[in-house]
Image (spheres, helix red, strand yellow):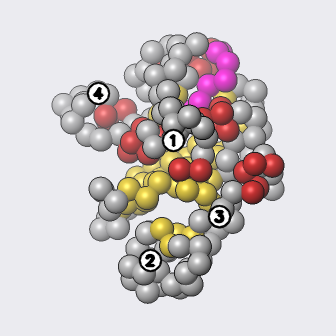
């Protein structure tokens, strides 16, 4: 049984130095650090000190033992904000609750994202249930994008957001990584 992440778990030293982001609670748009109000709707800025923009997240941090607690992707194409909140971090995996908040929708969409650090019976089971190869390391619960009449037609918002993560050389996060 993995431990639940304590909100006080520190970022790496590098993570602590990163700029903290503001996000509008009204329209979900990114707010400049220097601004006090949202330029889109005028809402006063409220910030979450743990929430960082996805462009500051590096693959090695996501895969490591001190992954970011929270990060977000402002998806202007779909007029939504996708947030990732770490809910488990142990020797087997890092697990995030992923929420896509669409400005015009009443209900947000939630998924779970696993990054497997090592193989296990539970890893194989979860991969199979979510229609992934048994050796896949990045596994989300957005099964509708892989099965049924809409497979391949519906955008996987989890993978869309993760595709914006790059390493120091600009190489994208390898979402097809296997054991």
Q: Is residue 171 above or below residue 179?
A: below
Q: Residues within 10 Å of mark 2 (few under 14, many from 20)?
A: some
Whether 135 is among the magenta residues is: no
Which residue position holds label 3?
20
Q: Residue at coordinates 81% horizontally, 56% vertically from top-left?
A: 8
Q: Residues within 10 Å of mark 1 (few under 14, many from 20)?
A: many
Q: Is residue 95 left or right of residue 161?
A: right
Which residue position holds label 2?
26
Label pair 2/1, CB-CB below 8 angstroms:
no
Asked if residue 121 can be seen in this view, the reply is: yes
Whether 119 is among the magenta residues is: yes
Q: Earlier in the sequence, mark 3 or mark 1?
A: 3
Asked if residue 113 can be seen in this view, the reply is: no
Which residue position holds label 4?
147
Labels 3, 2: front one: 3
Q: Earlier in the sequence, mark 1 or mark 4?
A: 4
Which residue position holds label 1?
165
Secondary structure of the residue carrying numbered label 3 = loop
Labels 4, 2: front one: 2
Labels 4, 3: front one: 3
Q: Which residues are magenta?
A: 112-120
Secondary structure of the residue carrying numbered label 1 = loop
Question: The N terminus appears in which quarter of the rendering?
Answer: top right
Q: Residue at coordinates 67% horizontally, 18% vertically from top-left?
A: 118
Secondary structure of the residue carrying numbered label 2 = loop
Q: Residue at coordinates 48% horizontally, 33% vertically from top-left?
A: 172
Q: Is residue 8 above or below residue 31?
A: above
Q: Residue at coordinates 48% horizontally, 68% vertically from top-left?
A: 30
Report the Cα–Cα distance between label 4 and label 3: 38 Å
Q: Quadrant of residue 163?
A: top left
Residue in front for this viewpoint, 136 or 87? 136
Where's residue 71, x and y in %? 58, 53
């Amino acid at each position: 049984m993995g431990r639940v992440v304590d909100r006080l778990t520190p970022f790496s030293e590098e993570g602590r130095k990163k700029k903290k982001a503001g996000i509008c609670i009204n329209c979900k748009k990114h707010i400049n650090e220097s601004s006090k109000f949202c330029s889109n709707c005028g809402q006063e800025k409220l910030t979450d000190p743990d929430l960082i923009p996805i462009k500051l997240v590096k693959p090695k941090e996501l895969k490591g033992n001190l992954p970011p607690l929270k990060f977000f992707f402002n998806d202007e194409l779909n007029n939504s904000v996708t947030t990732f909140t770490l809910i488990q971090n142990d020797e087997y995996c890092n697990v995030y609750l992923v929420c896509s908040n669409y400005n015009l929708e009443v209900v947000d969409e939630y998924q779970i994202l696993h990054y497997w650090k090592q193989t296990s019976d539970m890893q194989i089971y979860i991969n199979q249930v979510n229609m992934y190869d048994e050796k896949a390391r990045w596994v989300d619960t957005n099964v509708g994008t892989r099965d049924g009449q809409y497979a391949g037609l519906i955008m996987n918002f989890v993978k869309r957001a993760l595709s914006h993560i790059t390493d120091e050389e600009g190489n994208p996060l390898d979402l097809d990584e296997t054991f």
